[in-house]
Amino acid sequence: MTIMEPRKHGDASDGTVGGRQTRFEGNLKVTGGATYALEYPVEGLAYAILVQSTIPAGSVVSVDAKKALAAAGVLMVLTPDDDMGLLVASDWGGNRPENQPYYPLPRQVQYNGQSIAAVVAESREQAVEAARLICITYEKAPHVASFNDTAAGEGKVMDNLTSGWGDAEAALAAAPVQIEGEYSTPREYHVAMEPHGLTVKWDGDQITVWEPSQWSHGMARSYSEWFGIPYENVRLISPFIGGGFGSKGAALAHGAVAAFAARKLGRPVKLALTRPQNFTNYGGRAATRQTIKIGATEDGVLQAIVHRGASETSTYADWPEQTGAATPILYRIENFSSQHRVVPVNTVTPGALRGPGKNPSAFGIESAMEELAYKLGMDPLELRLKNYADRDYQSGKPWSTRRLREALIEGAAAFGWSKRSHEPRSMRDGNQLVGWGIGCGTFPVIQAPSEAMIRILRNGRVEVVSGAIDMGQGTYTILAQTAAEVFGIPVDQVEVHLGDSRLPGSAIAGGSMLAGSILGAVHKAATAARDELIGLALNDEKSPLRDTGANTLTFSGGRIAVPRDRGPSLTLSELMAALGRDEIEIRRNTLPEGATVQEQHQAWTTMAKVQGPTMGEYSMHSWCAHFAEVRVDEDFGTVRVSRIVSAFDCGRLYNPRLVESQWRGGIIMGIGQALLEEGLVDQRNGRTVNNNMGDYLVPTNADVPHIEVISVGIPDYGASALGGKGVGEVGIVGVAPAIANAVFHATGKRVRDLPITLEKLI
Amino acid sequence: MRDFSYLRASSADEARQAALQAGSVLLAGGTTLLDLAKCGVMEPETVIDITYLSGLGGIEVDANGARIGALAKMGEVADHAGIRAAFPAVSESLSLAASAQLRNMATIGGNLLQRTRCSYFREPDVFPACHKRNPGSGCSAMGGITRNHAVLGTSDTCIASYPGDLAVALIAFDAVVELGGRTVSVDDFFLLPGNTPERETVLKRGEMITAITVPASAAARNSTYLKVRDRQSYEFAAASAAVGLEFEADGRTVRDLRVALGGVATKPWRARAVEQALIGTVLSPETVEAASRLAMDGAVSHGANHYKIELAPRVVARAILKVGGLA
Ligand SMILES: Cc1cc2nc3c(=O)[nH]c(=O)nc-3n(C[C@H](O)[C@H](O)[C@H](O)COP(=O)(O)OP(=O)(O)OC[C@H]3O[C@@H](n4cnc5c(N)ncnc54)[C@H](O)[C@@H]3O)c2cc1C
Ligand code: SF4
């Protein structure tokens, strides 16, 4: 457990919910005091390194490890010949096949860069060198490198993602104005600064895993199921994460390999993926393509949208990167049809990456809307406002809150949109063509039950305890603010303990669902603890507040008092001392009353109890509108983003400073997606050849312009207990189309395939 | 990474002697060497650290030109007031290269000897075929992803581009590499791949770069380095140009013009045809554009790098117009 000391900054109001408190763990991180998973000083470590396939498909005939085993320092080589005796763990939904063996180093090769062997040695360098001495004989099989390969075929329709109402085809055919475009996005990767990896140690049949995790409980469950040990025997520790972006929510094969090696050797083992291995050991965002047809009246009223999309998946699992996720809910649309396919190719199964589904979906629909605006000769802002969705036409439900109109209007005002000249290529600054574009985004409000513990200590400090994760988004800080508010104490009187599967259960730090979920639990537990304290203070004979005749107490300015100053006031520590109590500990969860222990376990360790955006009476989402200005060098085709204004409706903001930082982070990733990021796959062998940070480009500081973010949200108590909606994912959604639209406005060239690299514009 | 022995050279002669051994390499800033050792491309048995040697650093600039010690850091040279005044293109080529961290580590000698960024060169386990790494084994890049490969100076064996920036500026201004016993012009220092892509320079085993000298010229004083790439910073050039220009006394007629290209050729590329076409003429945007196209004489594309043939002349033209006061 790590104890957080808050930074003292700003005024007292910063410490309560909604205040701009700086990050609790900020000092530790910038001074190097935060210990990450691969830095834990564990005695007697052995080092493991993975060996990955260099072919895209086939099987491992034999692994000759003689030379590697004879190399200096080598302790063990694991290959597909080793039966580790593991069992397949549950999927995210909690479904688990009975007694099915799990081979983290499989014989079947399904993609280039798949882990098929591991070497464990006294040092990492020795392990790396020995790994190169391993000789693998394959039997090759034909492969499909990408969904552009003709052998890939059309893929399979995902029935659960097929959606429609009205008669879209007929309404489209009848519409006087029609546009059609095909939009595509390449494979994109998380490239978190901290690589994946873990340090793992067994004590008998108890296992401790230090591993960066977006979900300590869910990942602990996988370890327990793989190894057939009780859940309680696993402790997964993850107080800090150097970036996850969706990649660190599940335990992966390398975790099983390291844990097995540690058990077999009877020594703790550390395994870190190399940077190239971070491109193939888990999936990034799948490549997508989609066609969108829109029919409209001459004055720009949408009549129909027909959407057909596809994304790559692996040959062994279906992971859809839903190109139709944002399409149905951004605009008022009476006739709609959408279908999404997955196309199996020889890749690692893709995974969630910031704004999954919504992100490529928004690239399609928001590009198409601007194409329509130009076809109509209409201001793209006006077109969007004209077709504003008064309700969710897909679910038929009213919005809980939807301030996308305000986002568009206030964003446009801050950006100066009214000064725009409509014609492409009509704005210029020397060699630079200047363009403006809009892109809207959305992300659903998802929630999961969570649990939290509050401890009031005799020294007057309050502890918030939860297994929830802070991967930089601010969990430590906002939980401290919540407790500080409930107890009316300064935030530096609160300690927060997070990132440990032994602590109370929590929703995953993903899908923008953590803050809304865990804050509800912490608020509930803190309120219950305060009520307990009030009860004691009013009833305990040792309490100086007992005979004041009050039936409740106030908590404010660090003091507990009788309402309207009708008696003494005490600090928390004075009251605890008077009561003779060492601590008051209260645990609460947000499951329905009377949930069984099994139900609780299921709630924390699977997604079975996750609530989607339309499961209640409302349709609940975060919204945003991005306004981008680009400068395109006419001769060179280079695009530089010179300004971004983004307005967001994410409901109530628990800490605007941290929220703004998340929005900006999402926008910066969106700049990378728009202009730079693309996994380059060699069609001949399915290898991602730019598998390093020198060649897979993400924005540098020099690529990031001034970004102005605006909040237009209002508290949405339908969406969460404290009124917030998700903030983490939505920031990236809509950025790429805003930039692509601005590039069109600047140059007159419509780039429908990301990224917009210079050769597409010269 | 393979075990290697580490030798800290106490004199230049000791370093040269040690470097005569097969499997020995010199270590300067290490930013190329360690990177490639981790990739399994370079497998030194002995690493001879020359960074403790005295007399190999230093930057001197006088009326005749500049002498830059092999161990001078990229960052130091970029920021040197004398270099900035007399050779702006040299300074800019360095400040636009790599990142601040790398520029603080990397040396000028090592910089010249950086290796190609061809992805196929860098992953030996996955792509065994690479003539440059393993002569006779083939070329994995041809038929693969070639967006960053060269369009000039390629051969049937290798199309890898020379990625560095500094050498492009040096070649434009007739810089000379000092190798202890002998000197070679930067132009002659680098070799075309031909049938021997594994031989990239004329450096012999046991030789060491001790310094680089650049003669002063009016063209060098009025020079620029223009680097074009998708990312604003910290990326190799899609195409770059080092250009220097001197006018006749009339202030309009070109007396001297230097043009070199980067990011598009297998070695730093001097574009003499462009220079010849414009020397003695009065510049106009049209003549510059037409002449700049001559830089691509003999260019061959290999698929995705085709855009370089279009892009590079535009970069050259912009750079000429800039130093000519027309842009
Ligand atoms: C991510 C990344 C981005 C980069 N971007 C750019 C860029 O945009 N532009 C650019 O120009 N460069 C770029 N570089 C390359 C960088 O400039 C070189 O790695 C660096 O200049 C090499 O210098 P060094 O001193 O570190 O060389 P080292 O790695 O020490 O040596 C490189 C080679 O030269 C030999 N050597 C070194 N000194 C001598 C000497 N005096 N005599 C003989 N042989 C010697 C060594 O034996 C070795 O073979 C980049 C590098 C990286 C890693
Ligand atoms: S282009 Fe040259 S360096 Fe690249 S694979 Fe071919 S031979 Fe090797």
Image: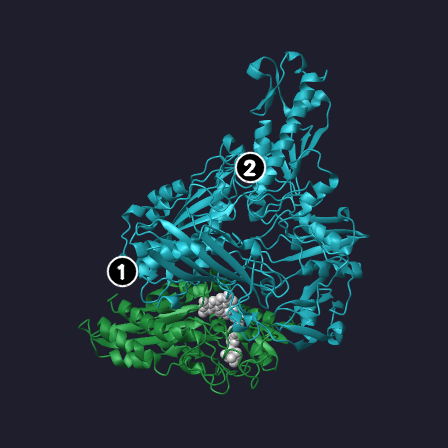
Chain colours: A cyan, B green
Three-letter residue code for mark 2: Ser
Mark 2 — residue?
A720
Mark toward the viewer: 2 or 1: 2
Q: Is residue A65 above or below residue A208?
A: below
Secondary structure under badge 1? loop
Q: Is residue A511 above or below residue A639?
A: above
Is residue A100 in sight in this rendering? yes
The quadrant the N terminus of chain B occupies is: bottom right
Contact between marks 2 and 1 (CB within 8 A): the answer is: no
Q: Is residue A349 above or below residue A643?
A: below
| 2 or 1: tag closer to the N-terminus | 1
Three-letter residue code for mark 1: Gly
Q: Position of residue B169 (x, y in %)?
A: 38, 72
Mark 1 — residue?
A430
Q: Position of residue A706 (x, y in %)?
A: 39, 49
Taking depth in this image into account, of A454 and A506 the one nearest to the observer is A506
Taking depth in this image into account, of A392 and A108 the one nearest to the observer is A392
On what subunit does the disc labeled 2 rest?
A
Q: Position of residue A417 (x, y in %)?
A: 32, 47
Q: Label 2, label 1: how many angstroms apart (C-alpha)?
A: 50 Å
Dot 2, how many residues are within 10 Å of its Cα: few (below 14), some (14-19), or many (20+)? many
Specify whether tag 1 is near ligand 1 (CB below 8 Å). Answer: no
Is residue A24 in sight in this rendering? no
The quadrant the C terminus of chain B occupies is: bottom left
Residue projecting furthest to the left: B250
Q: Position of residue A152 (x, y in %)?
A: 55, 70
Is circle 2 on the same chain as circle 1?
A: yes
Dot 1, how many residues are within 10 Å of its Cα: few (below 14), some (14-19), or many (20+)? few
